[in-house]
Amino acid sequence: MRVRRACTKEPRKAEAMIREDILQKFPDLFGNKKVNGREVNVQQTIATVTRELGQEIAAALTARRVLLQSPAPVAPGRSGTTRLKIP
């Protein structure tokens, strides 16, 4: 059985699981910050972006992995940059 949350005016707050070593190494990056005049909680923002873009992030990482592991030669692109066709 699924339990539904009661509707409130407050959006559901999510907390990102930040590795402890990262929190200790870069404590000034996390917590509440003022961004463009608005108060933002960095962990909640990371959690929201991860939740909303999780599938796209996974697809991009998979494509990157395929690219890095590919033995195919890299062909020059139109702008002089290199590109590789990913199946």
Image (cartoon, rainbow, N blue to C red):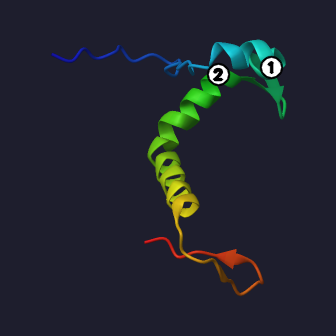
Q: Is residue 57 above or below residue 37?
A: below
- Quadrant location, the N terminus: top left
Cβ–Cβ under 8 Å for marks 2 and 1: no
Residue that extends furthest to the left in the rendered view of this protein: 1
Left or right, 68 with respect to 6, comes to right
In front: label 2 or label 1: 1
Q: Nearer the viewer, residue 12 or 46?
A: 46
Q: Nearer the viewer, residue 71 or 32?
A: 71
Residue at point 21% right, 18% down? 2
Left or right, 11 with respect to 22, comes to left
Q: Is residue 42 above or below residue 71?
A: above
* Residue 43: image tag: 2
Residue at point 84% right, 30% down? 37
Q: Position of residue 26 (x, y in %)?
A: 80, 20
Residue denoted by label 1? 26
Left or right, 80 with respect to 59, comes to right
Q: How many residues crowd around disc 1 within 10 Å: few (fewer than 14), some, or many (20 or more)?
A: few
Q: Amino acid at mark 1?
A: Phe
Residue at point 79% right, 23% down? 29
Q: Position of residue 34 (x, y in %)?
A: 82, 24
Residue at point 62% right, 30% down? 46
Q: Amino acid at mark 2?
A: Gln
